[in-house]
Amino acid sequence: MRKLIKNLKAMGFAAVAALTISCEGFLDEKPSKSILVPESVAEFEAILDNYDRLSNTAPLPFLYSDDYWTTEPNWLRFSPWQQRAYAWSMEPYLLEETPQDYFNLYRRIFMANVVLEKLDEGPDWKQEDIDRLRGRALFFRASGYFELAVLFLAHPAEGTASAPKIPLKSSSRFDRVDGWLDASQAFAMILADLTTALPLLPEKTALPTQPSRFGGYALMARIYLYLGDYGKAAESAEQVLEGGFELIDYAKLNMDLAFPVSGFNSEVVLFSFMGSQSMVTSNNAAFVDSLLVRDYDATDYRSKFLFRNTAGFHSFKGNYTGTPDIFSGIALDEVLLVLAEANVRLGQVDEGLVYLDRLLGKRIADYQPMESMEGEEALETVLDHRRKSLLFRGQRWMDLKRFSVLDSKRPLLQRKINGETVGFEAQPGNFRVMVPSSEIQ
């Protein structure tokens, strides 16, 4: 599929290669001025169509999550930074290692800034082209900073005095830092970028990797849910329902296939992926807790869709990518779960359960709508199905972080490494990854 997208959206000029070139550290110098500089609408459009750069999300949230476990022989084959992340080190990268997540997310921001700087020059282009490019660039910049904030910053509701900060980069200069953002400042900028982008984004796009207006509202819903602003999360998610996306009926899937659904299916609102981390995510390395697997009812098609038996363990197959790459985008099932949770938390329990019923009717055999229940029981039910539906979607770490702050739910996660039990206390202050020391230097 990735090859197909590249063929459909071939770059075809040296500028994009220059703008996306890998480097030892993010703050390296710009590429040589002798390299061709993009000038046309098509060239800047191609920068924002670079699927492998802009739709590739950070693996650390998955590595830290309790979605999976691995055996000790497998762990020994992990890369050093992967081993440290698996052991919940909040400083996974050594000085000599390239900080993959940090670099990739700032590269996304850099690419967006390149386009925005050109637009600020007032090029003699059609206004519709300017608007479309600006909307897409602002969307990608917002998404990059959002992922950085979830990893490296405190949750805004913590209100800590000595909060960590991340670099603000508002230009295409690799070597320029325009300030440092704490959580509240970062989210103010993220939401401002998205709010400006929404009316500029088209309702329909050629590919779901390209942000549409519905994709913008879906990301807004995810962000507001993380922040605990349930009213705005519900308002944003409701906008997505106008996009004509349809739930997949799991009863009609061929569960014997290696990947029962294709990447660009009817549920996908916005497509992104977490590229395969070799030994970490392969189905003979990433296993799902048997207790979680047994929690799925016998009539629940999700268990057949999500899991396969590998060497006596349960591994994961239910990607919405149609490949081994983990789907980290936003699909209609997540949007309905946002609506269910937000409404229940706002005291509109019956409305919330209607959205949950809509989802489960396509997931469970002979499903009957839920009976009315009290708010706390309804919330636990919704969160239980969120856990079961969004497994291996890259959302679990974000959920654990917001639960620890907003709900005071602070479980102890445990793994066995080299014969010793390693634990992680889901306390608010424990969720902040250190900004890589190589980048601070």
Image: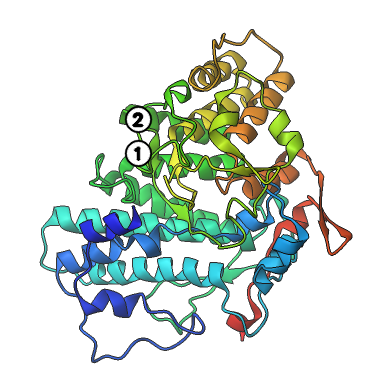
Q: What amino acid type is highlighted by mark number 1?
A: Phe
Q: Nearer the viewer, residue 89 or 283?
A: 283
Give the percent coordinates (x, y) of residue 300: 59, 22
Give the percent coordinates (x, y) of residue 390: 57, 38
Residue 61 vertical placement versus 100 (above, below): above
Give the percent coordinates (x, y) of residue 333: 48, 31
**Residue contact at pointers 1 and 2, CB within 8 angstroms:** yes
The image quadrant that residue 384 belongs to is top right
Residue 344 vertical placement versus 107 (above, below): above
Q: Secondary structure at mark 2?
A: loop
Q: Identify which residue is drawn at 68% across, 51% down.
A: 65
Q: Earlier in the sequence, mark 1 or mark 2?
A: 1
Circle 1 residue: 214
Query: Colour mode?
Result: rainbow
The number of callouts visible is: 2
Give the percent coordinates (x, y) of residue 92: 69, 70
Tag nearer the camera, 1 or 2: 2
Q: Is residue 421 left or right of residue 214?
A: right
The quadrant of the rendering that contains the C terminus is bottom right
Q: Nearer the viewer, residue 4 or 133?
A: 4
Q: What amino acid type is highlighted by mark number 2?
A: Phe
Find residue 245 and name its label.
2
| Circle 2 crowding by C-alpha within 10 Å: few under 14, some 14–19, many from 20 | some
Residue 350 visible in the current orientation: yes
The image quadrant that residue 367 belongs to is top right
